[in-house]
Amino acid sequence: MDGEIVPIRGEEILPFQELQKRLGRKKVSQELLNEVPVAFIAYDVLYAQKRVLINEPFQTRRTILESLYLNSERVRSGIHKRFADISSLDEEFAAARGRGNEGLMVKDLNSTYKPGRRGRDWLKVKRAIATLDVVVTAAEVGTGKRSRFLSDYTFAVRKSETDPTLLNVGKAYSGLTDAEVTELSHWFRAHTLQELEHGRVCVVQPKMVLEVTFDRVQPSERHNSGYALRFPRILRVRNDKPAEEIDTLETVRRLAEVVPDSPEDKGVGGVGGVGGENTSLSPRQSPQVGKPAHGAGSSSSPTSSTSAS
C-alpha cells in the first residue's frame, strides 16, 4: 500500500510537529507513545491478490483498497468522495480545511501508478493564505541539476517597525527559474559573509528581498522568530524593495492567528498525504483545478478523483 503515517487521536489528525517529537529517537518512551499516537492512512494499493497493480487504472486499485476494509485504530484508508463537476469544489475545499486537511487532491481514475511522477493525472489543489516580503539571510547548495548553485534560501523578517533585527521564518527552494537561480547564486557568492559546511551553506549579506507565498504559519522552535512558514514558495525577486522595508514579525503573528494551528498541519489527503478526503471529477475538468503534485489522494469515480490534502 501507499500511504502515510500520521499523528492521530481518535478521528482528529494532529499537527505535523507533534509527529516530529517521535522522529530521530533511538527509543520512544511510553509516555510519548501515549501523547502522540500514530496511524497509517492508506491512499493506494500497489500489490494485492498476488499481482502487481501499478498498471491498473486507479479506479480498480481504489476498489481493491476498499475491499480490504482498513478501519482499525492504527491502519485505515483515506476518505474519498466523487464529484461529477467542479461546481462543489470550493465547498469541499472549505470542508476539508475545516477537518484539518491542507487542501484537495484530484486524481484521474483511469491513471496508472507512476512512482515519483504524477503529471496531470494527479493534481494538488491548495490555496496560499498570503504573501510576505522577506530578506535572504543564508543560501545553500541545491540538489540535482541545481547542485552547483546556491538555490535554497533561508529568509527572515524584521523584528518590528522600529527594531531591524532579522528573525528567520522559513526556507524556500522552489518558484524561480534556472536563470534566476543562476543569477542569484552568483550574487550570493559575491556577498557571502561566512561559509559553512565547506561552502555548501553561505551566510550572506541581508540585502536580497524575495516575495514568498505559503500555506500557513505554524509555531516553530527551529527558527528564532518562533514561527515557520509551511510549504513556502518564491513568487519573485523584489529588486524594487530594500531590506529595510520587508515585513515584520507582527505581520507573521497576525497570519498565524488567521488560520489556527490545526487546520493545515493536520494532513494531506492522498498518497504521501495525511488522512485526506477524495473527490471525483472528470478528466476534462481535473487539469483546471490545480498544479501537478508529487503526492496524491485517493478517490473513486468513473473518471477522476480528488482528495483532501
Image (cartoon, rainbow, N blue to C red):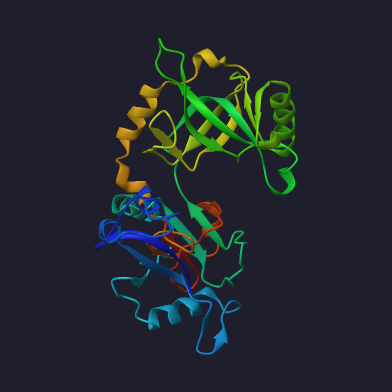
| Quadrant where the image shows the C terminus | bottom left
Residue 276 visible within the image: no
Question: As displayed, is residue 141 above or below residue 274?
Answer: above
Could you tell whether 295 is left or right of 72 in the image? right
Residue at figure coordinates x 44%, y 43% from the top left: 127
Front residue of this view, candidates 182 and 128: 182
* Relative depth, front residue between 196 and 153: 196
Above or below 144: residue 193: above
For the question of whether residue 140 can be seen, the reply is yes
Q: Position of residue 4 (x, y in %)?
A: 44, 64
Q: Position of residue 261 (x, y in %)?
A: 31, 42
Above or below 288: residue 223: above
- Name the side, left or right, on which 32 lies relative to 66: left
- Residue 284 falls in which quadrant of the image? bottom right
User: In the image, is 137 to the left or to the right of 270?
Assistant: right
In this view, which residue lies farthest toward the bottom? 50
Q: Position of residue 31 (x, y in %)?
A: 26, 58
Q: What x and y, as percent, mark residue 1?
A: 48, 74
Q: Residue at x 35, y 77 (%)?
A: 70
Q: Residue furthest front?
A: 26
From the viewer's side, name the closer residue of 11 and 36. 36
Residue in the picture at 29% in, 75% down: 72
